[in-house]
Image (tube, grey):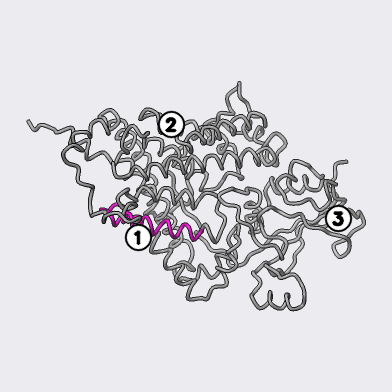
Amino acid sequence: MVAVDMTAVLSILSAEDYTIAREVLQRGFGLLFFIAFLSAWNQFPALLGERGLTPAPRFIALTTSAQAPSLFRWKRFTYTDRRLHIVCGSGMIAAMTVVVGLPQAGPAWATIPVFGLMWWLYFSISAIGQRFYGFGWESLLLEAGFLVGFLGSHEVAPSLLMIVFLRWFVVRVEFGAGMIKMRGDSSWRDLTAMDYHHQTQPMPGPFSRRAHLMPGWWHRGETLGSHVVQLIAPWLLFLPQPIASFAAAAIIITQLALVITGNYAWLNWATILLAFAGISDSFLGWIIGGPWPGWGRPDSSGAEVADASSAFPLWWAILTAAFVIWQCVLNIPALRNLFSPRQKMNASFNRWGLGNAYGAFGSMTEIRDEIIIEGTLDPDATMDSGDWRPYVFKGKPGDVHRRSPLVAPYHLRLDWLMWFAALGDYRQPWFYALLERIGDGDAQIRTQLGPDPFDGQAPALIRVRIFTYRYATSEERRQAREKGQPRPWWVRSNPRTMVEPTDLRDG
């Protein structure tokens, strides 16, 4: 009979060189959870609350717990806006305890219930969020938040199995996105996708115009670089150090570029955090001037090996191994999906949203259209006459002279859906409800918009037009400055009427 050296086994299963990665992952996702709960606190009542555009109570009544599990289905906690705020407040408090490190200072298991609580509270919100929560980064935050609690507190070393599984998560996110692009649109294959992306992306940022106006060779390099990082770098995470750390750094750098040139809520930040699962403490030490991190696990001999059982106890090894095995089973559909010619994007394969498929921009939009909602206090105004004033959104383009703001990782849900509406997705209940609330001067929906052009008054009439937008060139901005005119950020053309002047006031 072969004797098993349990101390050696525990030493192998212990990822002692990834304590910094654990800190980044847990505190980072704690902060993202805080932002997500804050976003729900500020936006959910107006969009989905008791008087929202698509009220959650009505959705709950029309669906089952199998279709949309949620805390708000409990008879003693049915949805109200007040209870929504209780859930959000509780989630923000739990998130801040992680950010400051309170659960991490407790027993090994202490992080699990805290992250589990945040997961369940936010899952309860997302499950009834309908179209306003139909974004890939919602499931990304939930799944990652569910996982990172099992990295444990400071009392134990991180589990190597968990570190490896989180790297597999990066493969699902990055490689999945890369394959969606290659399968979905020829512009990704002929390297022209970035000729359009910065201008037509859903929520441009303050540097998106500059990125768009870069020369063609630069855009070809961007597209090619995206393919290399998404299709190759994630697999390098499974190689020895420092190769894994260099691959993770490449992913982080490309995600930071997306942070600078766009507003994708917490998608990029969540991917950055997950990529830290590939970066060892030794590599970070080398970055700041320490010794070369080597090509394998740090030498664990002598006193370090003798202490392995206390740094990584057997019960913790069994618990984390069982958890990873369970997650691997849940990931089987996602694995099949990655290599399927009919690959699904941002799909869930079970009711709890674990083991999802991810991806973005399977098709590239080449023309940017923007919906402009306008109102007037003149009841006799026509399409061609009257003092029409636009309703400004907080983030989406509208005023051609306004520079696009930086809002991520905060998520402006209504602004995002307006981008989809301009693509033809406006035949939705939320869009018609939005027009009615604006036309009625509803105070709640005004909290989701920019400055009110009529200081709280309901407009006599509203109209809706759609324009084609493009970035102003440097020459156009220079000419405007020479004429003493405001320099445009956008140039718009091709106006079309979506809704004729209409009185939407009650009564």
Q: Nearer the viewer, mark 1 or mark 2?
A: 2
Which circle marks residue 376 in the picture?
Answer: 3
Q: Which residue is mark 1?
A: 232
Instruction: Depth check: give the residue in front, 235 or 407.
Output: 407
Q: Residue 93: where, in percent of width, then height?
A: 55, 32
318 left or right, relative to 480:
left
Side of 292 relative to 113 (left or right):
left
Question: In the orientation shown, which residue stands out farthest toward the right?
Answer: 380
Is 178 colored magenta in this rendering?
no
Q: Give, as a three-letter code, the residue at label 2.
A: Pro
Quote the CA–CA distance across marks 1 and 3. 55 Å
In magenta segment, residue 253: yes
Residue bearing mark 2: 103
- Highlighted range, magenta: 232-258
Q: Residue at x 46, y 70 (%)?
A: 191
Between the C-alphas of marks 3 and 2, the distance is 54 Å
Q: Is residue 238 above or below residue 197?
A: above
In three-dimensional space, the C-alpha distance between marks 1 and 2, rounded to whole angstroms, equals 36 Å
| Quarter the C terminus occupies | top right
